[in-house]
Image (cartoon, grey):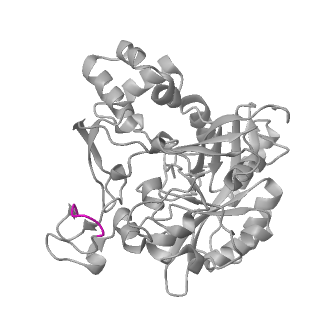
Amino acid sequence: MMSKSETMRDFFCDMHVHIGATSRGTPVKITASRKLTLESIIRESLSRKGMDMVCVVDCAAPGVLGDIRRLVSEGQLCQHSDGGFLHRDQLAVIMGSEVETVEPHGGVSHHVSVFPDLKTISEFSRVMSRYISNMELSSQRARLRAGELYDVTKATGGILIPAHVFTPHKSLYGNAGRRMSQVIDREKDAIIAVELGLSADTSIADHLEELAGVTFLSNSDAHSTQKIAREYNIIKMQRPCFKEFVLALHRRAGRRVVANVGMDPRLGRYHRTYCLQCDRVQTDPPPVLDCRFCGAGGKEVVRGVYDRIREIGDYDSPRHPSHRPPYRYQVPLMFIPGMNIRTMDYLMERFGSEMAILNLATDAEIRQALSGEMARNLIDARNGKLKIDSGGGGNHGRLKKREVKYDQLSLFT
């Protein structure tokens, strides 16, 4: 374990990963792969993805709590004195629980409650069993409003982070309300961080004035091992653990998120409004709330994240507060044209992890490792030079041939 006197450095952190099944095969997150177990998350995060810290968001399920206790007894996980667990002194595992809340008007949103140790999350699980019919499954609807979930989380020793806050079906801004302060009407600065979600980035989120003081997180919301670290954060801390993570969210004592890393939001499944009637993504300038092709509206269209933000935003263009870190666009290996499992395995063996391939390998090293066209695709993807068709309605956007490089938000500090 690292000493308290050690200087701070940057860590790769994915703070929203699901479990598909327990070690006994019982389901946890219904929509996640059954191969996504606590053990497979640890292996993938450390050995292939190159993560330093990962938050598993199904830990209030009794079956998952049992798996955690077993790994502790086997010495695979060791409790960190400042919260969370360590695996081989290399990977920090933080415990969280995603919960679905519903407002009086019917608006639904997902939130992640994050905890430091088994005692606090076990108490959270016990209390939440009063409000959730089946605690064995993840992301279940609670008979609570979002503000009430905040109260339970705080009382049991955790922090609450609204999840994928702009997606159309189950999120704070996409479904529950137009303002966070209306949905979670608690003390000032009650919410210290929100998760942007796949279809949004910093430039989209900073159209909202009330988010100026909030830390942004970019997490994968992985439902399979391959999608771990599809999005992640680079966080400056002394060591990866719960206490340092909370300090970073507060931006205290030099701890902070120094970069959000994720796919271009156009690749997200809900970036633009999508018509269910004519099966088309809307391309007119936002906000587009009805289909411009066939005239369909209401429940016949799935409202896009970008369109929703432009509908409720306070500003015509984003206003980035001075503390806001850059958002770095990155294309995961699995999205690159021509990439397959065999090529990915070869690259992993050669460079060590996906983080090394995407962040550390030089263009020359990529050209040495791959043939001409595949090397060009990977290098172009790393440099943002692939054409993108926007996603919508649950369908990911698509990467095509080269286009002019998009502007990176690392231009501001």
The residue drawn where x is 45% and y is 64% is 207
Residue 251 is situated, as x and y percent measured from the top left of the image, at: 69, 52
Of the pair 165 and 315, the residue shown nearer to us: 315
Residue reaching furthest left?
294
Compared with 71, 371 (above or below) is above
* Quarter of the figure that contains the N terminus: top right
Residue 276 in view in this figure:
yes
The residue drawn where x is 54% and y is 30% is 48
* Numbered label tally: 0
Residue 202 is situated, as x and y percent measured from the top left of the image, at: 47, 54
Q: In the shown orientation, is residue 269 left or right of residue 86? A: left
Does the magenta segment cover residue 408?
A: no
Residue 340 is situated, as x and y percent measured from the top left of the image, at: 34, 30
> Picture quarter containing residue 364?
top left
Residue 201 in view in this figure:
no
The residue drawn where x is 65% and y is 35% is 10
Specify the principal SS of the magenta part: loop
> Picture quarter containing residue 160?
bottom right
Compared with 134, 40 (above or below) is above
Residue extent of the magenta highlight:
282-287
The residue drawn where x is 30% and y is 60% is 392
Of the pair 147 and 185, the residue shown nearer to us: 185
* Quarter of the figure that contains the C terminus: top right
Q: In the shown orientation, is residue 270 left or right of residue 55? A: left
Residue 173 is situated, as x and y percent measured from the top left of the image, at: 48, 71
Residue reaching furthest top?
368
Does the magenta segment cover residue 285?
A: yes
